Image (tube, rainbow, N blue to C red):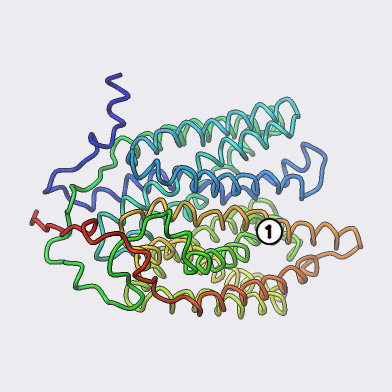
Amino acid sequence: MTALAMLDRRRTIARWTYNRWLVPPAALAVHLSIGQAYAFSVFKIPLVQHFGTNLTPIAVIFSLAMVMLGLSAAVAGTWIEANGPRKAMFVAALCWPGGFGVAALGIATEQLWLVYLGYGVLGGIGLGIAYISPVSTLIKWFPDRPGLAAGLAIMGFGGGALVASPLSTKLLTTFADGPAHGLVPTFLILGAGYFVVMMVGAFTIRVPQDRWCPPGWSPSSRPRHLFTTGNVTAANAVKTPQFWLLWIVLFCNITAGIGILEQASPMIQDFFPGVGPVAAAGYVGLLALCNMAGRVLWSSTSDLIGRRPTYLAYLGGGILLYALVAVSGGWSIALFVVLTGAILSFYGGGFATIPAYIKDLYGGLQVGAIHGRLLTAWSAAGIAGPLIVNAIADREKAAGVSGANLYTPSLYIMVGVLAVGLLANLAVRPVSDWFLEPSQTVRPLIALEG
């Protein structure tokens, strides 16, 4: 009981003089671990070969993880707000690495459904819980710079593949003569490592004192554009049109980016047949770097120019970039890498900016719970993006098409998807005062030096 009591929210409340810059590393430890999901494409070809199937059944593993991420975040959001980040991170540290163990058993026994259950369902639940708990905590620590705060938290999720991609490739190569051509020991080692790192993050996280704010800052100093004058609960937020417009914006931005990300390793090998698995893994790592950099750069920029203009850049820029990849992406590897890297920077920026967009529109009362409900858009996009890219690639391949032409139809589809998101973002307006909580829920903040 004593050990479990350490998980209680009251045991994570920081001193008034606590340095808030000690919190981002704890959040980063968790997000770097779950960011391995973005390196899943490294496993695709080995899994296809091991199970003797096509791309689409293997892509279901990733899509299922994204579905469970969104659903678990939506269901657990209010629970996380009430119980604090440490307990949530602890649960996630059991689910995400545990999913690797179950998936390894499925690979060893050649039972694909166990891989779905492990990496997809159990791992996906861990992804959702681990994803939102550090974000809502950091936004509470950085009310003066919510875009930067969200970027610092979510940066790790984008950058996790930067570590996981070369590490996974090295492990697969090292254990190539072992069970299932190295897949089983690779999954087991990754799961054990992520468990340790996530536990370190869980037991070092802190939440601020009630009514704390940074020295020299007050809510009245923030820009007013699209800001609510109070707080909206998660239950009321889903009743507003702004919530569903943000849902569409997030769905479209994720669908476009995740289609490339999930298929990154096979895609570059199809575009340029001279590229081998090791170089493709390096490309996946580079995309992870762009994804990670975009989360900090663009979300920080949104603190200066506003969330809606920032999303106009993501979606409008994405339309142009996807069209260029479709037309000229196969001309040179350098051009392909630059264009897709820019796309992934917008993709990452979209994730990092959405929590600040939520805080602008709904206040800081239940950012985590609202964020969790909004991430159901990720669940839907996790199905739509990979399905579009993989199904079209399988169909074109069956028809005798090869190379870059395998992906041309899906790239143009993504242009249309982004256009829908652009229109939805343009329609966002401030939330009506009718949805606000009574004024007594908006308590004054106290700033202390130190």
Residue placed furthest toward the left: 449
Q: Nearer the viewer, residue 294 or 304?
A: 304
Q: Residue at x 39, y 38 (%)?
A: 88
Q: Secondary structure at mark 1?
A: helix
Left or right side of 1 for 185: right
Left or right side of 446 for 55: right
- In the displayed structure, would residue 24 be above or below residue 243? above
Q: Residues within 10 Å of mark 1 (few under 14, many from 20)?
A: some
- In the displayed structure, would residue 241 be above or below residue 234? below
| Residue 181 percent location from the top left of the image | 71, 33
Q: Residue at x 66, y 79 (%)?
A: 324
Check disc 1 and report the residue beneath it.
Answer: 384
Left or right side of 130 for 87: left
- Asked where in the image residue 15 lies, by quadrant, the reply is top left
Q: Residue at x 72, y 33 (%)?
A: 113
Residue 166 seen in the figure: no
Residue 46 seen in the figure: yes
| Residue 225 percent location from the top left of the image | 33, 78
Residue placed furthest toward the right: 399
Q: What is the tally of numbered marks visible in this picture?
A: 1
| Residue 385 percent location from the top left of the image | 67, 60
Quarter of the picture containing the N terminus is top left
The amino acid on which the numbered mark 1 sits, given as a three-letter code, is Ala
Q: Nearer the viewer, residue 256 or 22?
A: 256
- Asked where in the image residue 293 lies, by quadrant, the reply is bottom left
Q: Residue at x 30, y 35 (%)?
A: 203
| Residue 400 percent location from the top left of the image | 91, 63
- In the displayed structure, would residue 84 be above or below residue 152? above
